[in-house]
Amino acid sequence: MSDVKITAYNVKTKEKGVEMLDAVITKTAKGAYMAQGNDGKGNKLTTLMGAEKALAAIKAGIAKQGWEE
């Protein structure tokens, strides 16, 4: 597999760089990309990301695409 990982800040535990599992990437109304998932312990994570990283994560199979083309 590739080196692509989706990480986010966990607001509940105040940890930085928590790896996101079961990620679904969606587009916002303004065209940005947003990943939503969990940390494997029941905590929800959300992060904004650039188009390049978002599309690479979908292509690598780490995240699912949450919009229709």
Image (cartoon, rainbow, N blue to C red):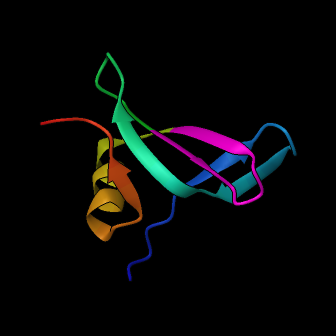
Q: Residue furthest top?
A: 29
User: Which quadrant: the N terminus?
Assistant: bottom left
On screen, residue 29 above or below 15: above
Magenta segment: 35-47
Residue at image coords 34%, 67%:
61
58 lies left or right of 34: left
Residue at image coords 52%, 56%:
22
Q: Which of 65 and 56 is in front in this view?
A: 65
Q: Nearer the viewer, residue 50 or 37?
A: 37
Residue 52 percent location from the top left of the image: 29, 51
Residue 14 percent location from the top left of the image: 86, 43
66 lies left or right of 3: left
In magenta stretch: residue 18: no
36 lies left or right of 34: right
Residue at image coords 87%, 45%:
13
User: Which quadrant: the C terminus?
Assistant: top left
Q: Residue furthest left?
A: 69
Q: Residue furthest front?
A: 42
Magenta region, mostly helix, strand or loop? strand
